[in-house]
Amino acid sequence: MEYQTERLILRPWKHSDREPFAAMNADPDVMRYFPSTRTREESDNMVTAADHILAQKGWGLWAVEEKSSGAFMGFVGLNIPGYELPFSPVIEIGWRLDKPFWGKGYAPEAARKALEIGFNQHAMDEIVAFTALENLQSQRVMEKIGMCRCEEFDHPSIKKGQPLCRHVLYRVTKNQMR
């Protein structure tokens, strides 16, 4: 299923998204707040998994396309983390956009739509987001979409003492979005 905002299309993945997605995931700037960049194979596997979950659940990580140009921009969506967190079980919202699309308000625009889909079409009660403590850009997006900062925690898949280990958790409920 495809969803639209004023400037964006959230849609299932296309085969043509794989190459720009892999390039984006190999970019150290885009992946700055992740432990490492991703290989082409890892990126392709992520697309395959995302597409499968979208087809199965009706929600997940959508490819994001700019309406005006038709350009693939990255992804936004809802996800069940594949690892145990101090606050599991949860549904998280996440996004990753390529550098040419940063600073234009696209991430909050797409994320608001994903929240709307989760709360209104899939009866989710709460959605969380988390990021490395030093990732102030993503924290600003979380605040712009109405999420509240709750707590800090050590990410279980990042070695303690590593710069990206400390994370911050944000939450929003369906009632807060009304």
Image (cartoon, rainbow, N blue to C red):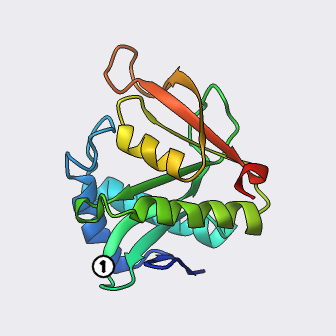
Residue type at mark 1: give it.
Ala
Q: What residue is drawn where x is 20% and y is 45%?
A: 28
Q: What residue is drawn where x is 35% and y is 14%?
A: 161
Q: What residue is drawn where x is 56% and y is 81%?
A: 2
- Percent x, y for residue 26? 22, 52
- Percent x, y for residue 48? 46, 65
The C terminus appears in which quarter of the rendering? bottom right
Please indicate whether residue 29 sits to the left or right of residue 91 in the image. Answer: left
- Percent x, y for residue 139? 45, 41
- Identify the residue under disc 1: 71
Q: Is mark 1 on a helix, strand or loop?
A: loop
Residue 60 visible in the snapshot: no
Residue 174 visible in the snapshot: yes
Please indicate whether residue 148 sits to the left or right of residue 102 in the image. Answer: right
- Percent x, y for residue 87? 66, 30
Q: What residue is drawn where x is 51% and y is 51%?
A: 144
The N terminus appears in which quarter of the rendering? bottom right
Look at the picture and state if 137 lies above or below 156.
below
Q: Nearer the viewer, residue 96 or 175?
A: 175
